[in-house]
Image: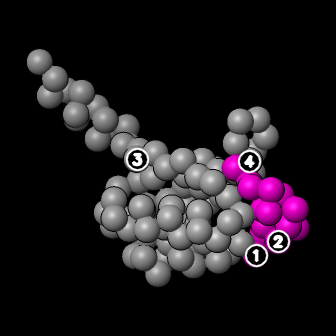
């Protein structure tokens, strides 16, 4: 299954209700699982992003649906990166001419 790294920032609404963040994370985990994906964890960060989520989804459409759903709830804005594991990255790079 493809891997995705979700970089997130709380909106004004999200930071006002930051105490609800653990509940929102549990709900997000359930969304990932319902979409057939795997939740590898959430990391709360400081700096450019407020949190990072590591996930797998069956396909890009499921990842995109997740991102849209999270955004539509109004608590966070996300940037999603499709990530290739080391072995897959090496394989792709090895095919370069």
Q: Identify whether 19 is placed above or below 50.
A: below
Q: Secondary structure at mark 2?
A: helix
Q: Quadrant of residue 93?
A: top left
Q: Nearer the viewer, residue 71 or 90?
A: 71
Q: Marks 1 and 2, how far apart in space? A: 5 Å
Question: Counting residues from the N terminus, which is met first, the one under dot 4 or under dot 3?
Answer: 4
Query: What range is drawn magenta here?
Result: 9-23
Image quadrant holding the C terminus, namely top left
Q: CA distance from mark 1 to mark 4?
A: 16 Å
Q: Which residue is mark 3?
A: 82
Q: Nearer the viewer, residue 48 or 2?
A: 48
SS assignment at label 1: helix
Camera-side residue: 27 or 42? 27
Q: Are marks 1 and 3 in contact (CB under 8 Å)?
A: no
Percent x, y of residue 2? 35, 56
The 10 Å Cα crowd at callout 4, few under 14, some 14 to 19, many 20 or more, is some
Mark pair 3, 2: CA separation = 28 Å
Q: Is residue 37 above or below residue 96?
A: below
Q: How far is mark 2 from mark 4, CA to CA? A: 14 Å
The residue beneath circle 2 is: 20
Do the numbered discs 1 and 2 sit on residues whose CB atoms are within 8 Å? yes
Q: Which residue lies under the disc numbered 1?
A: 23
């Amino acid at each position: 299954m493809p891997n995705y790294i979700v970089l997130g920032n709380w909106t004004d609404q999200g930071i006002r209700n930051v105490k609800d963040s653990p509940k929102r994370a549990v709900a997000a985990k359930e969304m990932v699982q319902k979409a057939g994906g795997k939740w590898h964890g959430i990391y709360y960060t400081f700096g450019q992003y407020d949190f990072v989520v590591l996930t797998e989804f069956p396909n890009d459409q499921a990842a995109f649906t997740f991102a849209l759903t999270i955004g539509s709830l109004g608590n966070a804005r996300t940037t999603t990166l499709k990530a290739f594991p080391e072995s897959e990255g090496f394989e792709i790079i090895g095919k370069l001419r």
